[in-house]
Amino acid sequence: MNIRLLAVTIFVLLFTITGFGQNARLRKKRVNNIEIKGNRVFSEGKIKSMLFTKEKKWYAFLSKRKYSESDVKYDIETIRKFYGRNGYPFTRATGVAMLSPKDTSKVQVTFTIDEGKKVYLSSVQIRGGLPRINTQLKDYIQKIKTGEPINTELIKASVYRIKNLYADNAYPIADVSSELEYSPDSSYVDVAFLINPGTYVLNGDIEIAREGSDKSKEFILRRELVIEKGKPYDRRKMIESQQRLYSTGLLRFVTLRRTLGLKEIESDTSVTDFRLVINERKPLFINGKIGAGQDDDFGAVFSTSASVGHRNLWGTGRKLILTGSISLQFTQRGEENVDSLEFKDLFSKSFWRDIKLQTVKNAVELDYVEPWFLGYRMPLSLSTEYKIRNKNPLIGKFYDQISGEMQLSRELNLHTNISFSARVEFVDIHDIKSDEQEIYRKNGDNSIRRRLSFYGQRDTRDNLLAPQKGIFSYVALDYVGDVLGGDFSYIKGEFYWSGYKNLDGSNILAMRFNTGVLEELAIDGSSSDDRFTLGGAKTIRGFAENDLGVKWGLPDVDSTQSLYGQPKGGKLMMLANLELRRTLFWRFGGTAFLDAGNVFYNVKEFKLNRIELVGGLGIQFFTPIGPIRLDRGVRIRKPFDLADGATHLTILYAF
């Protein structure tokens, strides 16, 4: 008996070692060539483009392109699903890898496809289920069009969607399946969805299980739940409950599930209990940041900041955060005009002979957040900031600023929220008499603005970095100065809308409309910082940043000559964009766009023939932090001039 067992063991080991050795030999090799056999309907290039296994190409120098057995298995399933989506439910595929006969350091992968017969959809039926829920299936069924090639993946997806719909209507254990009945020659197929709703389910008790820390009080977790005991089961409310718990910022892990088993209370009604498992984040935290960039006042700024805070005061979800920041700039020793430095100056040998670091901006900020104000899920944020000895390059003076802000937010639903805020500021300019400070405050970022603001937003985009469908819109209204005091007085309103539509899977149509108006409540009631500007990579391409509209001239600027030629801003802004986006190859995408709009210093100056129109093309490289894009915009005028435009290199889409 022992001899037989030993013989079997040796045989299994030899078989395993031989197989593993072969796989290991191939796994370390580079994929040199991919061959597609048996395809008639779709081209070799089309099939290769969807594979995870890729050939080694000259432009993919950062990718190893190594052979992987799991990748080949994944690709086989990808091919089968692709054909299934296009009317070929009987497609079979295999994948074989072997050493290249010309170079044994490389692997050749061959995919063989048996396409089978093309099948058309004859009819779609619903069998079983409940009429009141089945009436909601209309949108699902409309996507499965008769007379067209069958889409087997859409059929499978519809099964899950129907099951979820029943779970959203208190039938979480509904049994849903699909039945395909082929014609004698397999040219046509009838599809039937079979539905057994099961029992009607009510919500029961919710158990909270903690992993690790237990700092948070139980009531602040339960108040985020939208499922209620005794109410009908609703899968959507379970998902919303988890999202609300995540949004508190207190938890690193959340899962809410039904417990196994149902408690029957009537012949057709049951109760289910829930188990909420959470893992809390540490309440105390320290963050740091360092970077370099440009801002409105200085050409090159090196900044650093540090924050220390508590995200769960007394276990109630309240937050308190203290942040300190400092911004510095290199300058020639004895040079006071630090705003003239640009990044290109850092590469000049003469610049580094006699330099010093000069502080240009400092700030300390304290923030407090009350997540449930007056017992409602309506976060109240209070913040105060103290800017210490900041430099205003326009007047060559240092100033201190103390500001306070209150913001109250309310989430109306999953996609819509509104907020109201109030802000006050106090400024003291060094070495300036109190009765002269108002004159100096008119220039630069040391002005006093006291404001009341309203903001409402709706966002249904499927992806924030590269949306393919949905909309994003907001309305903003500011009331500044007037009875509130301060240096400027105006009312400012803005409307923004952008929409995204997937045309055929690879083409995305993106549209945007943005308009705003500002009404001054006093003479010189606004500055360039308050008014609207357009031009640049994010608004109207083909123009430099904020370059559209009127500029400051000599009669306007008086003693502040540094504003001469700079954008003056407008009290009326109109912007429209139309962009077609599509993937090209690998991680590259392309766009064709039309941008239109302008800013007008006064509303009465608006004329349709003053709307600027720009057309252009762009290319994007997709990264984990968003697309890096290069756009060339050309101003459309008579005569048409390709040289009259601008090139923009930036990250993320324009909208």
Image: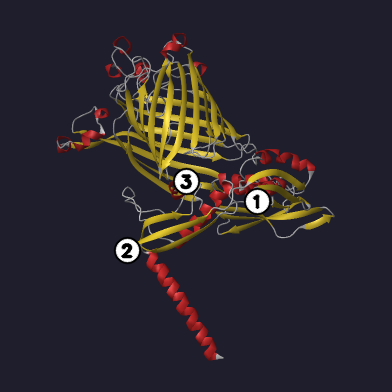
Residue highlighted by disc 2: 105
Residue at image mark 3: 309
* Front-lying residue, 282 or 404: 282
Is residue 259 left or right of 115 when viewed as pictured?
right
Nearer to us of marks 2 and 3 is 2
User: Circle 2 sits in a helix, a strand or a loop, which is it?
Assistant: loop
Q: Are marks 1 and 3 in contact (CB under 8 Å)?
A: no
> Which x, y percent locates residue 642?
31, 23
Q: Quadrant of the N terminus?
A: bottom right
Q: Tell me the residue at 31%/49% (across/down).
A: 58
Residue reaching furthest to the front: 185
Amino acid type of the residue that numbered disc 3 sits on in the rendered structure: Gly
Q: Nearer the viewer, mark 2 or mark 1?
A: 1
Task: Tell me if 550 is positioned left or right of 468 in this view.
Answer: left
Three-letter residue code for mark 2: Ser
Under circle 3, the secondary element is: strand
Measure the C-alpha gap from mark 2 to mark 3: 55 Å
> Label 1 to label 3, Cα distance in Å?
67 Å
In the displayed structure, would residue 29 be above or below residue 430? below
Above or below 293: residue 68: below
Residue ID for mark 1: 186
Residue at position x 61%, y 44% in the image: 149
